[in-house]
């Protein structure tokens, strides 16, 4: 019986932690990652930031990143291929793989990572949590759910908890009305996150709903 875990994690020693801290309005969405060398996993991620030159200066200075290449860019969005440094970085990838974990979704903003993972059971999740705690990672658990129950629920509701929270609040406050009953900044303030972060949650949530119920 698998376990679904949704949580937030923050540390300057996590990969890209220094860049997220330096650029609070930056959002990073992990698309996929793999590792020929588990100490230096390769990550493909989408970034959204208004100043690409400054972003790349921060990436150059980020000691958790060994090298990076910009593959695609359009406006303030860009796709990067990055290789993690092999020293001075929390080996989260190695540890969750060893625990049997699977990364389902990972979004970085406001200096923190919002993470959704699947583990074989509670013991394997506890093993990974204990590891993060030992590395002094700030950790905030949002949800633990039976993986089969979560899967069945996901058949009718493809949203993560954070996406659902943002969309429901925006709807209740009239954000989707014409004319709008509130603005993005107000929704962000009520959620305690940046306007950029709530914009990403709404965009990704709407995209999931369209994929699931429209296309």
Image: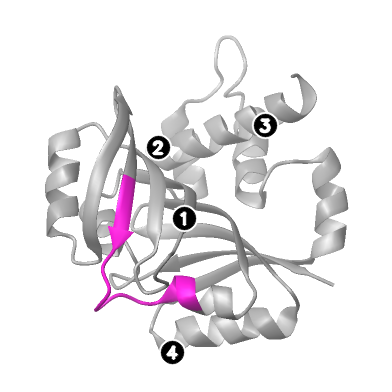
Q: Earlier in the sequence, mark 4 or mark 1?
A: 1
Q: Earlier in the sequence, mark 1 or mark 3?
A: 1
Q: Is residue 8 left or right of residue 62?
A: right
Q: CA distance from mark 2 to mark 1?
A: 27 Å
Q: Residues within 10 Å of mark 3 (few under 14, many from 20)?
A: few
The reply to whether dot 2 and dot 1 touch (C-beta < 8 Å) is: no
Q: CA distance from mark 4 to mark 3?
A: 40 Å
Identify the colour scheme used: one colour
- In this view, 19 is above or below 102: above
Q: Earlier in the sequence, mark 4 or mark 2?
A: 4
The furthest residue to the top: 178
In the rendered image, which residue does mark 2 sit on? 195
Q: Quadrant of residue 53?
A: top left
Q: Is residue 131 left or right of residue 125?
A: left
Nearer the camera: disc 3 or disc 2: 2
The residue closer to the viewer here, 119 or 159, is 119
Q: Residues within 10 Å of mark 2 (few under 14, many from 20)?
A: some
- In this view, 77 is above or below 43: above
In the rendered image, which residue does mark 3 sit on? 172
Secondary structure type for disc 4: helix
The residue closer to the viewer here, 66 or 111, is 66
- In this view, 154 is above or below 73: below
In the rendered image, which residue does mark 4 sit on? 134
Q: CA distance from mark 1 to mark 3?
A: 37 Å
- Give the residues in magenta: 81-94
In magenta segment, residue 89:
yes
Secondary structure type for disc 1: strand
Q: CA distance from mark 4 to mark 1?
A: 24 Å
Q: Quadrant of residue 47?
A: top left
Q: Which mark is residue 33?
A: 1
Q: Which residue is found at the position 49% from the left and 86% from the top?
A: 131
């Amino acid at each position: 019986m698998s376990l679904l875990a949704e949580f937030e994690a923050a540390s300057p020693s996590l990969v890209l932690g220094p860049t997220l801290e330096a650029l609070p309005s930056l959002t990073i969405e992990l698309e996929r990652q793999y590792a020929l060398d588990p100490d230096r996993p390769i990550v493909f991620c989408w970034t959204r930031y208004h100043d690409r030159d400054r972003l790349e200066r921060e990436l150059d200075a980020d000691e958790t990143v060994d090298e990076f290449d910009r593959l695609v860019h359009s406006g303030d969005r860009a796709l990067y291929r990055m290789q993690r440094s092999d020293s001075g970085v929390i080996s989260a990838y190695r540890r969750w793989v060893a625990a049997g974990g699977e990364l389902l979704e990972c979004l970085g903003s406001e200096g923190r990572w919002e993470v959704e993972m699947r583990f074989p059971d509670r013991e394997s999740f506890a093993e990974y949590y204990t590891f993060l705690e030992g590395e002094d990672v700030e950790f905030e658990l949002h949800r633990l759910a039976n993986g089969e129950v979560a899967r069945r629920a996901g058949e009718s509701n493809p949203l993560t908890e954070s996406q659902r929270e943002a969309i429901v609040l925006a709807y209740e406050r009239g954000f989707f009305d014409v004319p709008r009953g509130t603005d993005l900044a107000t929704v962000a303030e009520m959620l305690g996150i940046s306007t950029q972060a709530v914009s990403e949650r709404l965009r990704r949530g709407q995209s999931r709903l369209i994929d699931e119920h429209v296309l």
